[in-house]
Amino acid sequence: MFLGKLLKRWVSSYNDQEKELARVVRQITGRKPFNIKLYHLAMQHTSVAFESGAIKGFKESNERLEYLGDAVLGSVVAEYLFKRYPYKDEGFLTEIRSRIVNRESLNRLAVKIGLSQMVAFEGRKNSALSHKSIYGDAMEAFIGAIYLDRGFHFTRRFIIHKLLMRHYDIEEIIETTTNFKSLIIEWAQKNSKAVEFTVSKQGGKDGKQFKVNLLIDGDVQAEGAGYSKKKAEQDAARKTCENLTLI
Amino acid sequence: MFLGKLLKRWVSSYNDQEKELARVVRQITGRKPFNIKLYHLAMQHTSVAFESGAIKGFKESNERLEYLGDAVLGSVVAEYLFKRYPYKDEGFLTEIRSRIVNRESLNRLAVKIGLSQMVAFEGRKNSALSHKSIYGDAMEAFIGAIYLDRGFHFTRRFIIHKLLMRHYDIEEIIETTTNFKSLIIEWAQKNSKAVEFTVSKQGGKDGKQFKVNLLIDGDVQAEGAGYSKKKAEQDAARKTCENLTLI
């Protein structure tokens, strides 16, 4: 009762911008925010960062919250996949997790749930900047804000029920072609090997057919072909993955 | 009361190996394990993996738990540093976290808390394998096991109070020379730039004095000097970090 009154008094002290943000937070998470300032900060891209009164030279933006949210999101998705796929190895789990939390995927998610409209940044909307990573960064910062505002269990439920189960088709994500290039690079880092791709041939009528060699520590492992450099690299990487029995 | 009796019955069904493991878990975490099988699995390096009866071709080892523990540890350390250093930016937080949870540091931690003696792997103790990453991997898997056995809050307290506060001197970690090379590489990845180090000179009486150029997208940014290639690279990286105002 007392808490309810207190919350009302807080809410009545919100300015218009905060009221709108509180409405959006409630719509997205299902609950009113306790501390609206956290969510406000989560929406502040570094291009509109303001200098903190407390410490000279320290600019407040959503980057710290993004760092926190990234970690929390990563661990919740890790556990979710761990439990959902009890007989899949850690290579599979790592790969699927990276597809769920990559920048592009988080950008799309921020737009889908209606968060993108709240993000404040310098520059025109729909400019190159807005497409790059701003929304995905804000998505992570928003998760960081929820975590600080409502704790681990609420955040975990939010991520699983309102993000993963509602906006991701994980079976489809799994069926999508594996990113063999990233598999090879990961393997190489683990085993301290150097990976290199070199174009061995560019031809075809329109000059768009590529052949690419994949080298490990300077030795050619496989040749890949495709209608773009990227596709030829994927092809070479897939062959190498097979040779190394990584897949 | 009933739960206590049940736990006693479970414990009395342990074999000798499990009893010893339960004793070690209690010593390290302060609590008896609920599910000893999780901790047993956490100690099984992939070199001693056994085929699961349930699924043909699926080998059980600590790698899945390692994947989970890595994520949980990462998020707890992220939050700890976030709250401990309210006026440090995310570059600082990321760097300090990576020093705390890197493989070497986790290897040492596993030895310090007495976990390393419980790890099962093929090969001689003190062989190259045992020094590389086995103990650090087991350390992460152990955290994964605690998380599944006792949940988030217990694991968070364990990591903060029994690992971070007891076995790390974070102020000292911060004062240790920054790894400028990794800072540059991280920055380059974020901004889609290519970083390259090339030796421009090797000389001195013993041929051990190096000069190294740091190139970004093919352009020389700075020259570093040192009594090893590594030190010269660090020097060049530090200068570049300064030029780019990354530090």
Image: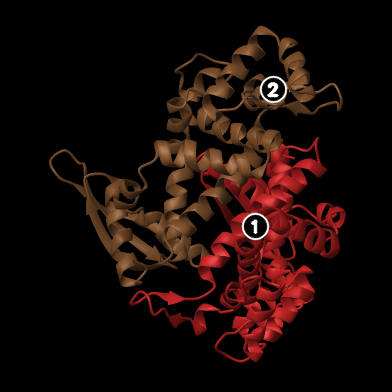
Chain colours: A brown, B red
Q: Quadrant of the N terminus of chain A?
A: top right
Picture disc at residue B107: none
Please tell me whether mark 2 sits on a helix, a strand or a loop.
helix
Q: Which mark is residue A36?
A: 2
**On what subunit does the disc labeled 1 rest?**
B
Viewer-proximal residue, A33 or A126? Answer: A33
Instruction: Decide: few, some or many residues near mark 1? Use Cα within 10 Å; few <14, some 14-19, many ≥20.
Output: few
**Does residue B214 appear in the picture of this structure?**
yes
Q: Is residue A161 left or right of residue A149?
A: left
A99 left or right of B244 in image: left
Residue B103, by quadrant, is: bottom right
- Residue designated by label 1: B151
Q: Position of residue A5 (x, y in %)?
A: 76, 18
Residue located at (55% from left, 30% from top): A29
Q: Amino acid at mark 2?
A: Ile
Measuring from the top left, give residue B106's x and y in whole percent: 70, 67
Foreground pick, A45 / A70: A70
**Label 2 Cα neighbours within 10 Å, binned few <14 / some 14-19 / many ≥20:** many
Residue that appears at 59% across and 82% down? B129
* Residue A93, horizontal then vertical, whole percent: 45, 58
